[in-house]
């Protein structure tokens, strides 16, 4: 598994935009995978949840959605 969180997003998504803005401001590195740009990425994301953003942390923990909280 990667050393940074994997974040599944949509190109147009208010919660995804909020995550990108907040994590960018805080300098948090992550591997962004946009589910609307690849069927394979969409299918991969569906293994973890159904609501973007889906955050998969290096320890395997999964969080769906973004409310401004980190971790």
Image (spheres, rainbow, N blue to C red):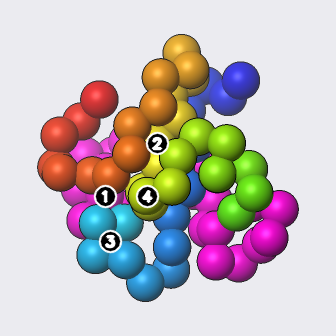
Indicate which label's residue lies in the foreground, 1 or 2.
2
Residue 67's spot in the image, x, y percent? Answer: 18, 51
Indicate which label's residue lies in the foreground, 3 or 2.
2
User: Are dots 3 and 4 in contact, CB under 8 Å?
Assistant: no
Secondary structure found at label 4 = loop
Give the position of the C terminus as an image quadrant: top left
User: Are dots 3 and 1 in contact, CB under 8 Å?
Assistant: yes
Name the N-terminal-most of marks 3 and 2: 3
Q: Is residue 28 left or right of 49 when viewed as pictured?
A: left
Residue at left offset 64%, top offset 51%: 46
Residue 5 visible in the current orientation: no
Secondary structure found at label 1 = helix
- Bounds of the magenta segment: 17-41
Toward the top, the furthest residue is 59
Residue position marked by numbered label 1 in the rendering: 19
Q: Tell me if residue 39 comes above or below residue 51 in the rendering.
A: below
User: Are dots 2 and 4 in contact, CB under 8 Å?
Assistant: no
Secondary structure found at label 3 = helix
Q: Tell me if residue 16 comes above or below residue 67 in the rendering.
A: below
Residue at left offset 71%, top offset 78%: 37
Toward the right, the furthest residue is 40
Residue position marked by numbered label 2 in the rendering: 55
Residue 50's spot in the image, x, y percent? Answer: 51, 55
Residue position marked by numbered label 4 in the rendering: 51
Residue position marked by numbered label 3 in the rendering: 17
């Amino acid at each position: 598994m990667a050393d940074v969180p994997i974040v599944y997003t949509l190109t147009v998504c208010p919660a995804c935009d909020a995550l990108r803005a907040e994590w960018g401001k805080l300098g948090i590195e992550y591997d962004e995978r946009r589910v609307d740009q690849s069927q394979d990425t969409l299918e991969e994301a569906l293994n973890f949840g159904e609501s973007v953003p889906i955050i998969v942390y290096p320890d395997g923990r999964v969080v769906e959605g973004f409310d401004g909280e980190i971790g």
